Image: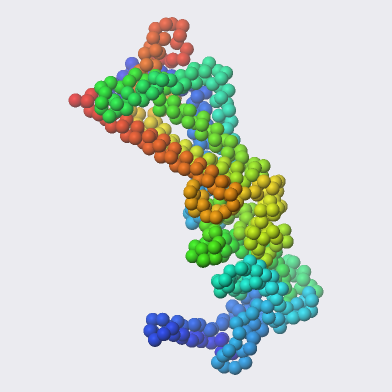
Amino acid sequence: MSSEQKTERKFLRMTKSQRVQHVILFVSTTILIITGFMLQADNWLIEIFGDYGEIIFSIRSWLHRIAGVTVALVCAYHLIYVITTEEGKSWALDMLPRLKDAVDAYQNVLFMIGLRDEKPKLDRFMYMEKLEYWSVYFGMTIVIITGIMMWTEYLWPRFYLEVANVFHLGEAVLAALAIIVGHIFSVHYNPHVYPMNRTFIDGMISEEMMKEEHELWYEREIKNLDKPAAGTDSNEKT
Amino acid sequence: MCHKYPGLGRIDSNGANNANKIKRVFYINNNIYEKTYHGSIRCKSCHTGVTKIPHNGIKKVDCATECHIIDPSSNKPFSHKKIVNDFNASVHGSEGSNTSAKEDLPVCKDCHSNKAYHADYEKQTAEMASLKVCEECHKSGEFTKRFFEHISYRTTKRRSSKEVVKLCSTCHADKELMDKHELDIVIGFSNTFHAKALFYGNTEVPNCLNCHAPYQLGFSPHRIASQKSSESPTHSENKHLTCSQSGCHIDAEKSFASGGYVHPSPEKIKISKIIGSQEKTRFQNTVIGWIQMFYKVLITLVIGGLAFHRVLDFHATRREKNKGGH
């Protein structure tokens, strides 16, 4: 913080479209987790709602469906986005898992436990971010399919619905915990960014943090800045 | 005569020890009794054979007794005999059940208490315009009011779904009792979507009776049959009709209701230990068990891994900061 001078440069990490997609995903997922786990509460806890229980249940049911549809739509949009737009293509391409990620993971673990002096140079998206990103594909596919099945319950044999239910719940527990343990930590409690990484709001990453956490990407961007024509996906502030 | 005096009772002693003494209260509050379903029936109509004091050698109350009320629909003395016979022939009854421990079977009083009409319901009916309409012709005020209450009270739900579940659970969630009768303990129900919605107070989801004794399909709680009986609404051949009752899964096909238990006890969903059930159910439970296991392992690995990585990261960052600081 001591180096907060007016000369600090910031780079664009999330475009407006990406931030909007993220906020929609984040708000609907939160609603889905709350309204979904309301069905897992013990009956004595549910009975605390007393006479309001019925209306709460009805609101819960609708909110879960509305948020579910919203999430499905934003996922569908994201697929179109990564296929058709330039920034989407670049995002997905940089997210693709590479052999380097495994090497990075190995070297970073060694560095963290103190068996290596230098942190590996990480690219635009480090292995954990890639893991989180692709997990959303895996998870969303499961919850969307099983969610639709349970919504159209009369079309399916009961056993299929039970399987759907177990997958839906298992995936929800996994996702909720992963968001809490993995994602919220990296955005809020990571010592680099505490109390909050503001990238998801303003889209920017500071030069200092970029250099520290995504050195390879930083070096590439700086190189691009030197070439006058290639400054499109980086935004320089002084 | 005597029972109107508060305090009337008897101390029963079970053995010489004073600690085992139980006071049995025999007091009847007439004001409350008159407001009950049976309030217009005199004591001796049910407690037959009471002719002397002490009341020795009298039989227990039999709900099939003809009481001193004339059924206005048939002009004959009223009796619950038909229902008692139906009940006895049902899976809960002494004739219908094949258990050897008949003493464990429920009796009328286990489900029916001679409870008072709700005070608020009494007040409500007294002001109802429809009752005033009846009273235009039927001058016998008390009878008309009672008749009206009788009919109108029966058109509303007498027990909430939660009460029904709790009532059935007194026996069906009692592991010892169910084991004794080789029945599946019904605790799995409380984890179903139906149960959750029901405990929130939703009235659209079924309670035990809506599936096991749906009036809509011509069944009754007094005629509950075992799921093995081809007559039962929960028999595999009839289940889809039960599920597709109006207001429920109306488009449900036969396959929707296929398969094993709707609310299996958790111990049935285990990979290895499966209590004697059909092959198909066994296969299905195994599949469900494996998926649950898959997620348990996945969640432990992923979340454990994430947490471990975060802790290491935290540690490394602090270490590097300290290095930089000194």
Q: How many marks?
A: 0
* Quadrant of res B88: bottom right
| Apparent side of residue B12 relative to residue A213 in the rendered image (left or right) | right
Residue that extends furthest to the left in the rendered view of this protein: B326
Instruction: Report if residue B174 is visible in the image.
Output: no
In the image, B265 versus B146, the foreground residue is B265
In the image, residue B294 lies at what x, y percent?
Answer: 47, 40
In the image, residue B223 lies at what x, y percent?
Answer: 67, 66
Q: Residue at x 66, y 56 (%)?
A: B235
* Quadrant of res B296: top left
Residue that extends furthest to the bottom in the rendered view of this protein: B52
Residue A231 in the image: above or below residue B226: above
In the image, residue B279 lies at what x, y percent?
Answer: 58, 49
In the image, residue A137 lies at what x, y percent?
Answer: 51, 30
| Apparent side of residue B146 relative to residue B55 in the rendered image (left or right) | right
User: In the picture, which quadrant includes the C terminus of chain B?
Assistant: top left
Display coloring: rainbow
Q: Residue at x 65, y 69 (%)?
A: B96
Q: Residue at x 80, y 74 (%)?
A: B137
Instruction: Report if residue B13 is visible in the image.
Output: yes
Q: Residue at x 64, y 44 (%)?
A: A157
User: In the picture, which quadrant includes the N terminus of chain B?
Assistant: bottom right
Residue B300 in the image: above or below residue A41: above
In the image, B132 versus B230, the foreground residue is B230
Residue B164 in the image: above or below residue B20: above
